Image (cartoon, rainbow, N blue to C red):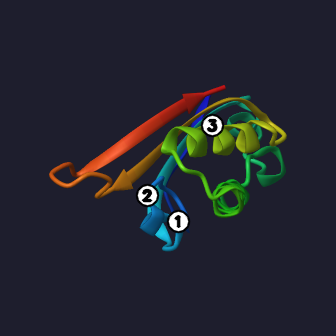
Amino acid sequence: MKLSVNGIEVDCIIGELPHEREIMQKLIVDVVMEVADLPARTDCIDDAVDYAAVASDVRETLVAARCHLIERAARLAAERVRGRNLVQAVTVRVTKSGAVPGIASATAEYSL
């Protein structure tokens, strides 16, 4: 089954330009995980993926990484979430608003 955690807000250093290396910018991260259907059958929290922990993992990873590119940010977040117990596969979408004048946002997606 698929389980999604959407709209994770992450304030971090992201970007290539000199001024981007000095200021925090907001990324929006969506995580879609392929997980066993055990919690759907048992209705037990102990069998489920912890949404708050997934969001925390993504935030910690991207704040520490100080990536230049959203492509790298998507990969690192996917690797971290894929390492969680119960997660069989993951797709992470990282969106950066205002990356280029005249463009609403840029998005990178990475699947493991």
**Amino acid residing under circle 1:** Arg
Quarter of the image that includes the N terminus:
top right
Q: Residue furthest bottom?
A: 23
Q: Residues within 10 Å of mark 3 (few under 14, many from 20)?
A: some
Decide which of 55, 35 is in the foreground and name it: 55
48 horizontally vs 74: left or right: right
Task: Describe residue 23's horizontal placement relative to residue 74 as left or right.
Answer: left
- In the displayed structure, 82 sits above or below 88; it is below
The residue that appears at 32% across and 57% down in the rendered structure is 97
State the residue position of label 3.
75
The tag on residue 21 is: 1
Residue occupying the point 73% across, 59% down: 53
Nearer to me, 48 or 81: 81
Q: Position of residue 43 (x, y in %)?
A: 72, 46
The quarter holding residue 39 reads top right
Dots 1 and 2: beta carbons under 8 Å?
yes
Instruction: Say which residue appears at 74% left-offset and 36% top-offset.
Output: 82
- Does residue 13 appear left or right of residue 63 in this picture? left
Kindly report the distance in space between the C-alpha atoms of the residues bearing marks 1 and 2. Answer: 7 Å
The amino acid on which the numbered mark 2 sits, given as a three-letter code, is Leu
The label on residue 72 is none
Q: CA distance from mark 3 to mark 2?
A: 21 Å
Asked whether, in this view, residue 4 is left or right of residue 52, the answer is left
Name the spot of residue 11 as percent of width and height, x first. 52, 69
Give the foreground label among 3 and 2.
2
